[in-house]
Image: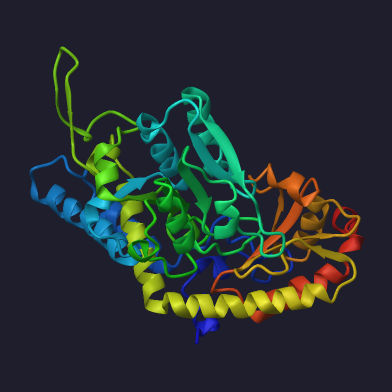
Amino acid sequence: MIDVNKIREDFPMFKNYKTAEGKPIVYLDNAATTFKPYSVISAIEDYYMKETANAHRGDYELAHNVDVHYESARETVKRFINAERKEEICFTSGTSMSINVIAYGLEHLLNSGDEIILSEAEHASNVLPWFGVAKKKGCIIKYAPIDEKLGIVTPKGLESVISKKTKVVSLAQVTNVLGGMNDSKALAKVCHAYNALFVLDGAQSVPHVKVDVLDLDCDFLAFSAHKMCGPTGIGVLYGKYELLDQMPPLLSGGGMNTRFETCGNILLQRPPLKFEAGTQNIAGAYGLKAAIEYLEKIGMNNIEEYENMLHERLISGLKKLDNVVIYNPYSTTGIVTFNIKDVFAQDAATYFSSKGIAVRSGQHCAKILMDYLKTSATVRASTYFYNTIEDIDKLIECAKDGGNFLDAYFS
């Protein structure tokens, strides 16, 4: 079991940032980004203080050392998600860039009338790139139905909309508002039965549960370091090698080619380097590796078990309050989305902030979903393994008085 008090000592934010009351912040916006442990900060610092050089450029010892560490980060990611080979791991700036690389890289497989399936619960990063590709290629965007109770796309739901014209299905393993965990392995089987590619947005799943791409049989997986105790500005695009080998890169520039000529001929690198144009976020790769090693030390199963306990406590507590509407009471992850009755979401979040609690309010980059939820905005609390039972209880206690939101403005 996780010793949360000991773990919190690893995170300088709990020591260095205090609320107006002089207390550590109750940070419940982990679906947006997470705090960073000393080991991650130290790894980033090591690059800038001890090993600064470009990767895959120099023929001197210092550059070689950076190459080794950079590729070691790729190997660490491979092991973490159980990819077949490290060449299937491409570094990007984050989930948004990863999905853009995938979407525009699959243009050559799409024709007018082909179908791309999403859901109404998807983050903008898993909607807007597909909108762009569909408009350019004349494709049809379809939406798999969301299970009203679980807030996920079920295999049966996907089967109700998929067809022989479907070329791509792109879904979040865990959506960032409804927080339900899709049965991605079963969804992949449905996709492949129709010869459709299955793209998995892992931004909200990879940091919290063990993800095994070989077992899931997804064709692509995208996730970000900053949501899993790593630095901002670096993410991962996993793809089956044969698919990556066929895809054109989104960006061009130094490092992604082996030769180009005056007549315009270009010889590209093989994956993953052909998707890594220009100088990469090398320090970010150091930090991502350290973040993964930190999570592995705690244990992904331990993290999942602990977060489930926090989630059950939060849902149970909020259900007892007559003034709270919960939009995902049956979700299975640390994301809990709710509103205080008759209080605008941003006002409620401001009230929580006045009590030292950080939650997210608004549409959470899932603007289509608001029509489905029949509300203009929501409050989202999202936990991680460094949150305490006391954090959860404080949120519940403050929600009781959430109708007094004007106190936050006039106190």
Q: Is residue 283 above or below residue 2?
A: above
Residue at image location 41% in from the left, 78% down from the top: 299
- Residue depicted at 51% across the width and 43% down the height: 163
317 relative to 84, above or below: below
Residue 386 horizontal side relative to residue 59, left or right: right
Residue 65 x/y as whole percent = 15, 54
In the image, farthest residue toward the bottom: 1
Q: Can you see residue 178?
A: yes
Nearest the viewer among 357 and 145 is 145
Locate residue 317: give its quadrant.
bottom right
**203 in relation to 334, above or below:** above
Q: Position of residue 107 (x, y in %)?
A: 39, 31
Residue 231, quarter of picture: bottom left
Give the x, y percent position of residue 233: 43, 46
Can residue 206 be spotted in the picture?
no
Quadrant of the rendering where the C terminus is positioned: bottom right
In the rendered image, residue 115, in percent from the top left (x then y), is placed at: 51, 36
